[in-house]
Structure formats: structure tokens, C-alpha cells
Image (tube, rainbow, N blue to C red):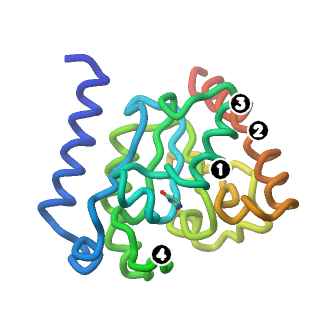
Amino acid sequence: MSAAVSTRQQLDDVRQKIVDDDPVPELRESATQLVFGDGDPEADIVFIGEAPGKNEDLQGKPFVGAAGRFLNEMLEMIDLKREDVYITNIVKYRPPDNRDPFPDEKQAFMPYLESQLDAIQPKLTVTLGRHSLNCFLPELQISTCHGQPKRYKDRVYLPLFHPAAALYNGAMRQTLIDDFALIPAIVDKISAVSKK
Ligand code: URA
């Protein structure tokens, strides 16, 4: 069995565990389906958003609406495709009316997200927006730490602004594009250090 198959199997197991545990029944009941994650299980880079929106809920994949198209564009700018990375959210069911997920809902899904990351073992974990950042590094402010890689407990995180927030805000949009452009060099540096 190849490594890719076994990581995929581990991810399938995490997905099944969410179905079995049913950590937030109210969200599951109001959503169309579980939005677990998408992309390469062996990816070097994992992107983590907040929660599925309407399009994601309908298609069962994260970041497939306007924010997702912007994310795809930025990936292309650094010569990557969606299939080269792995994309997921903290919360795996769409909150009703696109409200922000509640703190206890985010907390309830964190063990599954941790298991996803343990299975994939990415070189770089990119948090999209302050909710995603603060689930891992609660003391940091996105306004001051965006674009700066942070090593914490065997993982390297890169905090970025959320593509949906930056989409229609010219200054934030350019900052996000500039921060995104740092990703290849950050991954190269992590690879060089881990080979030593
Ligand atoms: N915003 C998110 O945080 N996640 C998605 O999947 C889509 C939009």
C-alpha cells in the first residue's frame, strides 16, 4: 500500500468519525451535507478557512464560491493548482444564514481538524482569516502577524487574511496577494531546514 493510499485512508477515517460522533447535530441538521476537505492528501500546504458557505454546502467542497475563485487565482500566481494543496475548514457544516460559527462549534470540530493535519503532515499550515488563526494561536492578532510564519508545536503556520474579507477591499486584497507570494520561499526554507 502506498503512502498516498494510507493518508487517504486516515482522512476517510476522520471523515467517518465526524459522521459517527455527530459533534454538532444542530449544524448537521440545517446543512445540506458535510464539507470535509479537498485536494492532495500528501500536500505540502494545507489551507484552513472558517466554515462552508452556501456554494460549499451545495457542492460538498470547501472554497468553491467567490472566495474560492480568488484563492484559486492566488494559487495560480504561485504556480500551484487546487489539486496540489489541501483545503479545509475548521467547521465542517455550513452555519445557518452564513452566520459566524459559535466558539463552541469551532471547539467541537478542532479534534477532527487536528487529526486531518496529523494525517497529512503538511510542511506549512496556512490559516485564512482571524477565526482560523485564533483556533491554533489564540494570542495573535491577524492585523500584525499576517504574512509571518510562526512555528508552534511541530507545525509552521502562516496567518493570512481571509480571501472573502479581502475580495472587495483593495488594500487588504493587495496585502493578501503579497503575503501569498511568500509561500513558495517559506516552504523551500522549511524543506531545507527539515533536511538538515
Ligand atoms: N469561506 C470559508 O471560510 N470557507 C469556505 O469553504 C468558503 C468560504
Q: Is residue 89 left or right of residue 93?
A: right
Asked if the residue under mark 1 is in contact with the one under mark 4, i.e. CB atoms within 8 Å, the reply is no
* Foreground disc of the pair 2, 4: 4
Residues at circles 1 and 2 in contact by the CB criterion of under 8 Å: yes
- How far is mark 2 from mark 3, CA to CA? 9 Å
Residue 66 appears at what percent x and percent y? Answer: 60, 54
**Amino acid type, residue under disc 1 in the picture:** Leu
* Rendered residue at 64%/32% (across/down): 187
Dot 2 alpha-carbon crowd within 10 angstroms: few under 14, some 14 to 19, many 20 or more: some
Mark 2–mark 4 CB contact (< 8 Å) = no
Q: Given the image, on which type of amino acid does mark 2 rest?
A: Leu
Real-space CA distance between mark 3 and mark 1, rounded to the nearest whole angstrom:
15 Å
Indicate the quadrant where residue 22 lies. Answer: bottom left
Residue pointed to by mark 3: 78
Could you tell me how far apart the alpha carbons at marks 4 and 3 are, in whole angstroms? 30 Å
What residue is disc 2 on? 182
Q: Which mark is residue 98?
A: 4
